[in-house]
């Protein structure tokens, strides 16, 4: 017989199965609630955009654009790419919909998959998920940066992500950074022979990225390089100092990290990252920063400022699973075991009522004997077995059995509904 090929998910992609997806739902829902409490509203964006949008925003010399995008020609010959991130799309949408005309700053968030053709490893995938937030508008007050960071840490607190560290830096602006980059490049040329091939190449293409190097043999050299924080212009210096004051005001713990330059070219001034434990080398669960010239660079209004972050959901969830505090999530409450033809319509009816009251109910499609039914209920993790046999059907009652300790009681319909409702409220289910 001809053997049939079995398909597998493409390298770097994966299925999130129900055993895990409940945690994902809870994680995203919690994020939505915290974001909403800071007056962020959702924007739903396309998964693909013109390639040029990403090239211009993120930078052609970055790894993300240069090596990692999934790019293809559409039928009308235009080049499109699966989004490697969503900040560029948010700016595109901001411009396209004339959002600068709306009052105040626009506070937007998005939830969804991103695509980068990276080498897969623990915490690094080719399709991964982000929860991101962006603030766009006329103001670049450091209070905006600080509020975003406060919100992130409140969010991580709610998610049970306790072992996190926030790193902050300032990468300056168009006034001060080019001069520093030139200085850095000159300095790097003098030690070129001692650097690895990636860093050697970056001296010419993007010297700031050398600071990001993790190669052990480059670390001592990098530590001796001139630091951008010492070369900021007066306005950037003041912005960074006010940001740190704001963080202290909000009692936010942070560490300064002069090497935090990030892998995307659009950043100005504030950059930040949050790391978490239990993840190995891919330990950044969130990255972000300010991108004040980006809207203008994309053909929008001059003077629009922006700042935002993206949480890597895959990594945040991994960290929760490996040492965080995963919540007890509500599962199957009631498994209905019914026996005899008279029990069936009663079972269908009560299942509908229990579900309407917010309980998770499983009504098996076929009748089995009681032992088998309760065995399955147990394997499915049901809290209760609801038994409807000939006796119950005849007397209009129900037998409710708590599966953990086999405690059981006979109840009328109204007693049953009342009892399970109070249980549900107690469990927060
Ligand atoms: P990013 O640092 O490239 O920033 O990505 C943000 C987060 O996404 C990372 O910290 C990481 O948790 C997660 N991430 C990135 N690549 C992967 C991957 N291959 N597998 C799993 N997780 C990954 C941005 O994307 C910016 N758009 C953030 C931003 C918003 N900046 C300003 N506004």
Image (cartoon, rainbow, N blue to C red):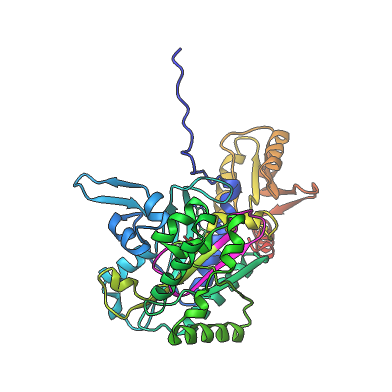
x, y percent for residue 26: 57, 59
Q: Is 396 on the left or on the right of 302, as rendered?
A: right
Residue shown at 26% from the left, 77% from the top? 301
Q: How many labels does the image show?
A: 0
- Asked if residue 359 can be seen in this view, the reply is no
Residue farthest top in this picture: 1
The image position of residue 315, as x and y in percent, is: 57, 56
The quarter of the rendered structure image containing the C terminus is: bottom right
The residues colored magenta run 264-285
- Above or below: residue 82 compared with residue 94: above
In terms of image quadrants, where is residue 413? bottom right
Tell me if 93 is positioned left or right of 40 in this view: left
User: Between residues 362 and 427, which one lies in front from this camera angle?
Assistant: 427
Q: Which of 377 and 218 is in front in this view?
A: 218
Q: Is residue 417 left or right of residue 232?
A: right
Residue 424 percent across, percent down from the top left = 65, 61
**Most foreground residue, 424 or 54:** 54
- Image quarter of residue 419: bottom right
Residue 206, visible in the rendered structure? yes
Query: Residue 226, position in %: x, y?
Result: 52, 73
Q: In the image, is residue 268 part of the stretch drawn in magenta?
A: yes
Residue at image point 49% right, 84% down: 237
Residue at 30% x, 78% y is 100
In the image, residue 25 lies in the stretch drawn in magenta: no
Identify the residue at image location x=28%, y=58%. Answer: 52
- Choose between 275 and 48: the one closer to the eye: 275
Give the answer, above or below, for where 387 lies relative to 200.
above
- Residue 361, compared with residue 44, is above or below; it is above
């Amino acid at each position: 017989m001809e053997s049939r090929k079995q398909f597998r998910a493409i390298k770097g992609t994966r299925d999130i199965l129900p055993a895990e997806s409940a945690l994902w739902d809870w994680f995203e829902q919690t994020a939505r609630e915290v974001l909403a409490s800071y007056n962020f509203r959702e924007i739903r964006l396309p998964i693909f955009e013109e390639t040029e949008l990403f090239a211009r925003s993120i930078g052609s010399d970055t790894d993300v654009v240069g090596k990692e995008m999934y790019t293809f020609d559409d039928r009308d010959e235009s080049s499109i790419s699966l989004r490697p991130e969503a900040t560029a799309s948010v700016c595109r949408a901001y411009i396209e919909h004339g959002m600068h005309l709306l009052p105040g700053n626009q506070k937007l968030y998005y939830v969804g998959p991103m695509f980068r053709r990276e080498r897969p490893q623990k915490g690094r995938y080719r399709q991964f998920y982000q929860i991101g937030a962006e603030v766009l508008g006329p103001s670049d007050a450091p209070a905006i940066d600080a509020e975003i960071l406060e919100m992130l840490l409140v969010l991580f607190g709610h998610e049970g992500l306790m072992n996190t560290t926030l790193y902050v830096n300032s990468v300056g602006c168009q006034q001060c950074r080019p001069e520093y980059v030139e200085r850095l490049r000159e300095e790097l040329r003098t030690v070129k022979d001692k650097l690895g091939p990636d860093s050697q190449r970056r001296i010419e293409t993007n010297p700031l990225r050398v600071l990001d190097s993790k190669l052990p043999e480059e670390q001592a050299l990098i530590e001796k390089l001139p630091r951008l924080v010492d070369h900021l212009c007066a306005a950037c210096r003041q912005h960074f100092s006010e940001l740190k004051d704001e963080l202290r005001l909000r009692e936010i713990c942070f560490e300064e990290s002069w090497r935090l330059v990030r892998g995307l070219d659009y950043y100005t001034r504030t950059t930040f990252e949050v790391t978490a434990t239990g993840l190995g080398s891919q330990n950044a669960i969130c990255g972000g920063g300010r991108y004040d010239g980006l809207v203008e660079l994309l053909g929008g209004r001059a003077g629009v400022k922006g700042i935002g972050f993206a949480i890597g959901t895959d990594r945040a969830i991994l960290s929760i699973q490996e040492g965080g505090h995963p919540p007890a999530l509500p599962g199957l409450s009631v498994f209905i075991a019914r026996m005899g033809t008279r029990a069936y319509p009663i079972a269908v009816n009560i299942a509908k009522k229990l579900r309407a009251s917010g309980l998770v109910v499983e009504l098996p499609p076929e009748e089995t004997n009681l032992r088998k039914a309760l065995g399955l209920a147990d394997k499915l993790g049901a809290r209760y077995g609801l038994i409807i046999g000939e006796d119950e059907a005849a007397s209009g009652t129900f037998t409710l059995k708590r599966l953990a300790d086999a405690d059981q009681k006979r109840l009328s319909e109204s007693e049953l509904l009342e009892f399970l409702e109070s249980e549900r409220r107690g469990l927060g289910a």
